[in-house]
Amino acid sequence: MRIGISCYPTWGGSGVVATELAMALASGGDEVHVISYALPTRLQLADPRLFFHEVVVPHYPLFEYPPYSLALASKMAEIARHQHLDLLHVHYAVPNAVSAILARQIVAPLRLPVITTLHGTDVTLVGNDPSYLETTRWAVVASDAVTAVSEWLRRSTCEQLGVSERPIEVIPNFIEPERFERVRSGAGARRWAQPGEKVLVHISNFRPVKRVMDVVEIFLRLRHEHPVRLLLVGDGPDRAHAEQRCRAEGCCDRVTFLGNLQPVEEVLAGADLFLLPSENESFGLAALEALACEVPVIASRAGGLPEVIEDGATGLLYDVGDVVGMARGAAGLLADPVRHRAFALRARRSAVENFSEHRIVARYRELYERVLAGASPAPPRG
Ligand code: GMT
């Protein structure tokens, strides 16, 4: 199959999922063309069946806002035509799905089915904004198939975009178990820790939705009960606030800001707990990566997180903002090595059994085949 995949290249979960999917499909024998405005962070082009096409957005003095969506649609149409794509799979609806539907119309009468994968904020924060609602809804309804990364996101899409007539298939995020197995014998998170310290890890883009200040609050409460170290991976708008808070509390010697460090498993392996107190999370790929590394997760009971973390078995879930509960739960787990070990083992087992790459990639591929066979219900084209 010849597959076009479009995504954001930066430090977001949607780009990571798209990139891992592209690499897995290529290593399984498909020809994959990744289309984005920069090389996605995790994309390794060592596979001869994997190609990258950069979307260049020319600047012109008239454009206060250069029209990326149009440059993207043009690139998609060009690649579809010249590389003989069988289909386009776009990750994150805004504007990728809109550009893809446009490209489909441009290349007609060539057939170019569009599969849209919704990742979360493209529906819950951006796509439902009045400025984008009409085009997002239009592109979702016009796609030949739509997937969402959790059952919660599927429901939210129907409610928030008002697209209940649109069948949406739930295909969750995935991990490659071996990737997380390989780091087990290394120093992992302990590189940054003093002997005897328990290591807490948080990984995100430090946007307000991640509630990074709650991460710091949990740590501040825990440090009175255990020698703990907090490792913060990623960067974004709330990093400076978190740094300020740590300075004000005089705890900088116990908190390490690692920035956009990759690969994340080098920080997760050997950690004691992963913290993800997000306001909302359609899935929580970082939590899944932690589980795959035998790290139990303390998280909020928000969005799709309960579909990833089994409360009381692989992690502990609390109401959004309940930093007291989260700190108490974390302290309890850290104080009980037998219970902690049981959580860690179940975490890895759940990640491998429910979210292994080979199973999830096979589901995407089955969907592609169904769409190409015309079997996936698609609405009439506009
Ligand atoms: O987490 C982010 O804000 C980035 C965002 C993205 O689209 O890149 O992540 C979303 O997609 C990930 C991959 O499907 C999910 O695991 C994240 O839960 C989701 N983020 C939110 O819903 C806030």
Image (spheres, rainbow, N blue to C red):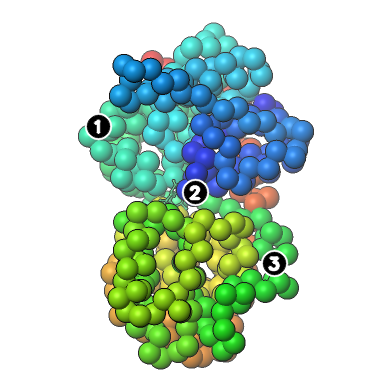
Residue 170 visible from this viewpoint: no
Q: Amino acid at mark 3?
A: Val
Residue 64 visible from this viewpoint: yes
Looking at the picture, how far across and down is residue 289, in whole percent?
Answer: 56, 61
The tag earlier along the polypeptide, 2 or 3, is: 2
Q: In the rendered view of the protein, which quadrant contains the C terminus?
A: top left
Looking at the picture, how far across and down is residue 170, in whole percent?
Answer: 48, 46
The residue labelled by disc 1 is: 131
Identify the residue at image location x=51%, y=64%.
258
Drawn side of residue 319 relative to residue 346, left or right: left
The answer to which of 158 and 331 lies nearer the viewer is 331
Q: Quadrant of residue 321?
A: bottom left
Above/below status of 233 relative to 35: below
Drawn side of residue 311 relative to residue 301, left or right: right
- CB-based contact (under 8 Å), mark 2 and mark 3: no
- Which residue occupies the extreme top position in the image? 109
The residue labelled by disc 2 is: 11
Identify the residue at image location x=58%, y=37%.
39
The residue labelled by disc 3 is: 183
The answer to which of 99 and 29 lies nearer the viewer is 99
Identify the residue at image location x=52%, y=83%.
198
Q: Is mark 1 within 8 Å of ligand 1?
A: no
Label 2, label 3: how far apart the Cα atoms are: 21 Å
Q: Secondary structure at mark 2?
A: loop
